Image (cartoon, rainbow, N blue to C red):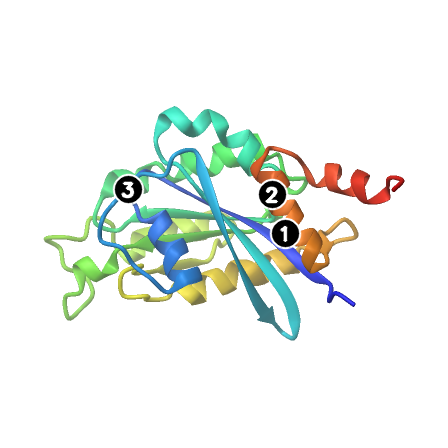
Amino acid sequence: MNQKKVLLKVIILGDSGVGKTALMNQYVHRKFNNQYKATIGADFLTKEILIDGRQVTLQIWDTAGQERFQSLGVAFYRGADACIICYDVTYQNSFKTLETWRDEFLIQASPRNQDQFPFLLIGNKVDLCNAPNGENSEIREVSEKRAQTWADSKNKMPYFECSAKENTNVEKAFEKIARLALEQENDSFNIYDSQDAARIQLRQNLGQSEEDLSNERSGCC
């Protein structure tokens, strides 16, 4: 018998170049690539984890930060269970757009309970400002205090300063967003066996919804 697993769809948002792909690859593959390559549209990876004895499959969607791809958001955001918003601690402009990314996600994803929807904030690239006090003023453009204040103003959004390069707080951040999503579990929460999880990944990549899968499962052979 296939073991039942919870499938969580997590979206990563933020400006181009803040390190969304690097964070995802570090978490899933434990790898970091210094060569930057912009994401075209969206891509996703999956990772199976165990949270409090519960089998969870994280489906992590890495979305393009370029403006020309933002119109595709409604297709990729649909069915999301949680959202990570990222900025670069060494680039202030990427911090200033956080509000826009969050608001746009809420508009396009249209979660049922927007006030309680699980968000998490990541300030990436702290390895570039590793002064003894953690605040190299010559490189860092966004202080930890400033980011924490913004996160607190958004319904106490959890905040982590990370380095995809050095794997600083990456696993902690992804585990936290998974826990937050699980806390929002309700009667319509997505639970699939391992075969269904693979099929739903393919269908979402093709723009089909979880409802399509449910209809197929209930149909005649």
Judged by depth in the image, the label closer to the viewer, 3 or 1, is 1
Q: CA distance from mark 3 to mark 1?
A: 27 Å
**SS for dot 2:** helix
Which amino acid is tagged 1? Answer: Ala
**In front: 204, or 115?**
204
Place of residue 111 in the rendered image (x, y in percent of width and height, measured from the top left): 63, 39
Judged by depth in the image, the label closer to the viewer, 3 or 2, is 2
Q: Which mark is residue 198?
A: 1
Who's the residue at 18% across and 58% down the image? Answer: 128
Q: Is residue 148 visible?
A: no
Place of residue 93 in the rendered image (x, y in percent of width and height, measured from the top left): 26, 38
Who's the residue at 72% across and 59% down the image? Answer: 193
Which amino acid is tagged 3? Answer: Lys
**In front: 69, or 14?**
69
The crowding category of the residue bearing disc 1, from other C-alpha atoms within 10 Å (few below 14, some 14 to 19, many at least 20), is few
Q: Which residue is mark 3?
A: 37
Which is nearer the N-term, disc 3 or disc 1?
A: 3
Query: The N terminus appears in which quarter of the rendering?
Result: bottom right
Dividing the picture into quadrants, the one containing residue 162 is bottom left
Q: Which residue is mark 2?
A: 202
Q: Is residue 204 left or right of residue 153?
A: right
